[in-house]
Amino acid sequence: MTRVPELMSAGINVAFGHDCVMDPWYSMGSHDMLEVASMGLHVAQMTSLKGMQQAYDAVTVNGAKVLGLEGYGLEPGCHADLVILQACSPIEALQLKPARLFVIRRGKVIATTPEQQRSIILDGQQQPVSFSTGLL
């Protein structure tokens, strides 16, 4: 593992990725970039709030820069390729392992997952629970 935080501090664009997706070399690969970010932040010891944001960027905007993607982002005129997560922030996306509510490609919904509902039972009564941290 290279010195990711030091490279980022030096202004170098660092992106995380993986190439093995359920293949003979690494059968655990899921092609889930949040999983890649989570693995990267643990291995690189980036578990501070700043580090988690940097790990999230390493699988989103930094990766797009490395690949030279045109039309990437949320600005008008971009391709509208995105995943809507059941999370309020990039930090929550890494902390909560949220549902991928919608996968959108070129502006069309191509996959959906129902919202996760969580509850606990206190004194025999079911109570809804939100694990949202509200951290931005």
Image: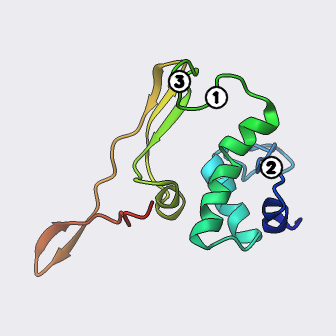
First in sequence, mark 3 or 1: give its number: 1
> CA separation, marks 3 and 1?
8 Å
Q: Quadrant of the C terminus?
A: bottom left
Which residue is denoted by mark 2 in the rendering? 13
Q: State left or right for residue 50 relative to residue 89.
A: right
| Residue 72's disc number | 1
Viewer-proximal residue among 37 and 11:
11
Is 123 in front, or is 89?
A: 89
Q: Residue at x 73, y 44 (%)?
A: 62
Disc 3 from disc 2: Cα separation? 23 Å
Q: Amino acid at mark 2?
A: Asn
Name the element at disc 2.
loop
Q: What's the distance in space between the residues labelled 1 and 2, CA to CA?
A: 16 Å
At label 3, the amino acid type is Ala
Q: Is residue 109 above or below residue 125?
A: above
x then y, percent, for residue 79:
58, 20
Q: Amino acid at mark 1?
A: Tyr
Q: Residues within 10 Å of mark 2 (few under 14, many from 20)?
A: some
Rendered location of residue 81, percent (x, y): 56, 27
What mark, if any, has residue 80 been given in the picture? 3
